[in-house]
Amino acid sequence: MSTFASITDPTDLDAIRAVIASTADAVDLVPLGIRALVISPQASFDLVPAVKSLVADGPTGTRRVAVLVDETAILRDGRDLKQQLCELLAEAFTIEIVVLGHGGQLHADEDALETATAAIKGYDCAVAIGSGTISDIGKVATDRLGGIPLVIVQTAASVDGFTDNVSVVLRNGVKRTIPSRWPDVVLADTTTIADAPVAMNTAGFGEVLSLYTAPADWELANRLGFDNSFRLTPRDFLLEFAGDPATWADGLAEGAPGAVLDLTRMLAIRGMGTGIAGTTACLSGVEHVVSHMLDMYAAAHNLPIGLHGAQVGVATQVASAAWDLLRRRVAEGEFTVRFPAASDLEQQVKRAFDVCDETGGRGEECWSDYARKIKAWNADPERMKGLVANAVSDDVAIAATVPTPASLSAGLLAAGSPTTPGDLVEWVTPDIWRWAVANCLFMRDRFTVIDLLFLLGWWTPADVDVVIEQAFQAESEPTS
């Protein structure tokens, strides 16, 4: 039985904290810093009391609130939610509305972060209303100002970043996850979330699916000495609430209240799980880096960036197929562990990103991360050979919990989520998808199953084709 089996309500943060404190891992984990999490059909209307509770704890008697929003219209029961909430706030506080982004586009780049930070300076509390991007910007901006109180009003269930303590930002055109802070209060209004565009919530389901693939990458990186953050408690916390997504996701595309509630709860749990782990690695493996590759391509070519969760969901099938390739190759017998010199790889890595930046800026950024990874791999070849042999023993037992691509596809279909690259934004052609999959290992320093395949000589162009074909075999097979 899981340590967290006694938790029936994931918004009972004190109960969760008590269970975490009772585990052997507790001393190694990051304290859960959210004060309150509300997931309900009326959660957004708890905003004024939430802000009052935080301002009352502040160092001054003034009550000045900055509201961070983007240009996207958000409707709740047909009414403008941002306008409603700002009117309610204005009855109790002096407010300043800060609209970020231009032309309907908002990225968490340095310009947006600086603009937000400057705009909220001197205020007693910040409120971020909207998407995961607004949430990330709010967390970074308030953290830069010493951690002024922050309330997040979650309006879609597209990502899990509302309840964690990190932010995804755009640095030199490349997505990077950086430390930021826990929000003080998260208000997830399931009525508003159900009214969100269908694609937003079905993308959230795709994000959830990394729960079934990324932990294997996390454990592999730990086994090979690349990541010492692996702990059982965050993993158990995440898995306790996972259930069978193909069951609870049914009806999500239609806005079924039960499915929306379950998705919102699961995303909140994911955020808290990565937060206490002190790393996003527990839920961010192959599937996430493929999505980041697509985002990089879009930014470089001024194309619309696809929904993160939708891309992640499709890419979980690639992650599963990659683990299956490793299992099959290991089962065939002996293997050779390669130790390529960094100097031999530098140009290969940089060339992989020429398609995004002829000046080489993005290639340099990615090489700076990848170089650390290959240096660590090459540091002690004999030791690494032993670690690899142990990691792939017992039929690659690390991957025992990774579902088949067909199982993941069934869940995506049940939720109404994209299942193939062709279901994503129209510019994701087969060639661009293949580029993203083939080169995803070169983007950052996090170690995944594809890194291991490459360093065993099993990530040739033919191998890439095999993995992509297997990943989407279920979708290509005729139905009776």
Image: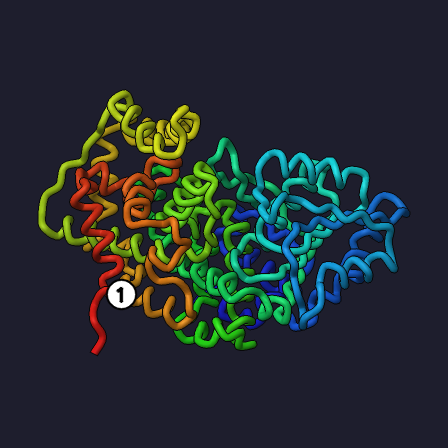
**Count of numbered circles on the image:** 1
10 Å crowding of disc 1: few (<14), some (14-19), many (20+): some
- Give the colour scheme shown: rainbow
Q: Residue at x 40, y 30 (%)?
A: 357
Q: Residue at x 75, y 39 (%)?
A: 119
Question: In the image, residue 124 lies at what x, y percent?
Answer: 81, 45
Quadrant that contains the C terminus: bottom left
Q: Residue at x 82, y 60 (%)?
A: 87
Circle 1 residue: 475
Label 1 amino acid?
Glu
Residue 154 vs residue 56, the one in the foreground: 154
Quadrant that contains the N terminus: bottom left
Q: Residue furthest left?
A: 333
Going by the image, does 181 lie left or right of 325?
Answer: right
Q: Residue furthest right?
A: 61
Label 1 secondary element: helix
Question: In the image, residue 269 lies at what x, y percent?
Answer: 53, 61
Residue 230 visible in the shown view: no
Residue 102 vs residue 321, the one in the foreground: 102
Question: In the image, residue 266 lies at what x, y percent?
Answer: 51, 64
Q: Residue furthest top?
A: 343
Residue 295 visible in the shown view: yes
Question: In the image, residue 256 lies at what x, y percent?
Answer: 53, 77
Going by the image, does 452 lie left or right of 51?
Answer: left
Residue 35 vs residue 454, the one in the foreground: 454
Task: Classify residue 298 by image quadrant.
Answer: top left
Q: Is residue 191 above or below residue 335?
A: below
Q: Is residue 93 above or below residue 148?
A: below
